[in-house]
Image: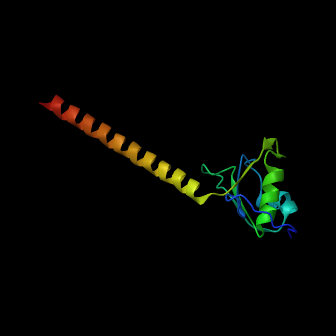
Amino acid sequence: QQNIKSRLPPEVNRILYVRNLPFRITAEELYDIFGKYGAVYQIRLGDKSRDTRGTAFVVYEDIYDAKRAVDHLSGFNVGGRYLVVMYYQPAKFQRRADAEEKKKELEELRRQIKLKKSQMANSNDDD
């Protein structure tokens, strides 16, 4: 383990968020890459058919292994793509999810307004 228990920055945790992965990469290949830095507890690949493709969550058993992976694998070339490896920050992801939800609600409201306007225009034409 870590001889000198140095203080880690607050954002450091065992869960890493990885972006810019080749779309065809497998969980086994990720275990090979990330396993070099310590025991990997779990890997979750993004859904190939959705906007999460090319992303993954990698969970280490030890926080220092996670830190070592971030230090060594950020910018690492895999299949011609350079990995973006960050610490998972739940608050940031929640804000992004909230923003996406608000955007969808706004689009739905705009669609409804457009529909109402066209219905009103059509009913005025009938007069």
User: Quick one: 68 or 73, which is closer to the camera?
Assistant: 68
Q: Image quadrant of residue 56?
A: bottom right
Q: Residue at image x 77%, y 53%?
A: 25
Q: Quadrant of the C terminus?
A: top left
Viewer-closest of 38 and 123: 38
For the point 43% across and 49% down, which residue is it?
102
Quadrant assignment for the N terminus:
bottom right
Could you tell me residue 119's position as x and y percent?
A: 24, 37
Is 104 positioned to the left or the right of 23 in the image? left
Apparent side of residue 35 relative to residue 44 in the rendered image (left or right): right
* Residue 79 screen position, x and y as percent: 82, 45
Question: Can you give x and y, in whole percent of width and height, for residue 24 in the image?
Answer: 75, 50
- 125, 38: nearer the viewer: 38
Q: Is residue 73 left or right of residue 59?
A: right
Side of 74 where 121 appears, left or right: left
Compared to 41, does 67 lie above or below?
A: above
Q: Quadrant of residue 123?
A: top left
Q: Quarter of the image holding residue 11?
A: bottom right
Picture residue at 48% right of the left edge, 53% below the top: 98
Q: Residue at x 78, y 54 (%)?
A: 70
| Residue 46, image x, y percentages | 66, 55
